[in-house]
Image: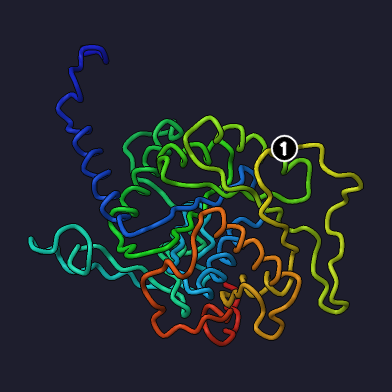
Amino acid sequence: MKHYHDIVGDGGSRILDQVAEQRARITDGLAGVRHLVAIGSGKGGVGKSTLTLCLATTLRARGFRIAILDADFNGPSQARMAGVQNALFVPGPSPSPAAGGSGPSSGRAPLPRTRNGIAVFSMGSLIPESSALEFESTAQGESHTWRATREFALLGEILGSFEWGALDLLLIDLPPGAERTVQFADFLGPRTSFLLVTIPSEVARGVVARSVAALSKGPHRLLGYVENMSGYYCRDCDAIKPLYFSAQPSHLDLEIPCLGTVPFDPELARRCDQGISVATPPDSPDTPVGLALDHVTQQLLDSLDLKLDSVESKLDSVEPKLDGLDGPERKPEAPR
């Protein structure tokens, strides 16, 4: 019987060559992306995905070229919220020898876009909500030993196989889990900056503090954090009401900049559920929620030193205003 230590090199599998080839495709596919920003927490249920979509919408309204990668393959939500659940993925034309790596002849598949031009990849466009992502395997049980490897291999295929094009920001919506955040940091490399999300809860801040400590050991830049659900917006009284009990300021210092606080908006939650999300409702653009999101967006741009006058391309017939992502309101789907 041949043992592990008897294997020379990669055992003839060419695994190292395969990894190098995939890395080259990823590098080439993201060559036109100026900034990669991963939005994580370590704690689930803090509104990470909603904040990601709202920031993308606000950035797009300012004229930036934006895409979202929903990296939560097992719990994708961006497809529903952005209104691209039924999007069709059409393979791009085969690459031609003269075309080089990127461009219209790269063979990469174009991404579905919202009506205001945000490119979105989400497993929710490919897998119904009643189904789960599965990986074929001949092994029975012990899936924890290989599932993460398969997931990151899939992430690499997505980054290398889709046409990301010229972008100012690619926002990566991470799955929950402090350990998962570190794994994604290792995979995405030092080029990726991180924005963390918490809520006014000592439990949530404690988990985010662990993510900060773990990420601080690596080469990645921590842009700061956003305190989400900082009260809720009451439309009837046009005021912010308490959502969490916090008699005293938190004793946990996250030791990274706070880019702002964003109240919970029930109307925004309703629109996300129906795939008609907007960063600020069009009938009341100056609500506390809209102003808070605008402030966080500006803080994010300042931290990246990204200015609109440095954007080379112009918007393609998209007015720079906050509007519905999927046009007029759609009726919710009938229960199945």
| Count of marks placed on residues | 1
Query: Looking at the picture, does residue 279 appear above or below residue 189?
Result: below
Depth check: give the residue in front, 52 or 273: 52
Q: Which residue is pictured at 60% across the width and 75% down the height? A: 278
Which element is circle 1 on? helix
Depth check: give the residue in front, 155 or 194: 194
Where residue 263 sits: x, y (%)? Answer: 75, 63
Depth check: give the residue in front, 127 or 315: 315
Left or right, 87 with respect to 267, comes to left
Q: Which residue is mark 1?
A: 206
Where residue 55 sits: x, y (%)? Answer: 57, 64
On-image quarter of the N terminus: top left
Residue placed furthest toward the front: 309
Left or right, 111 with respect to 292, comes to left
Where residue 46 sits: x, y (%)? Answer: 67, 53
Q: Which residue is pictured at 42% across the width and 63% down the height? A: 168
| Location of residue 126 (image quadrant) | bottom left
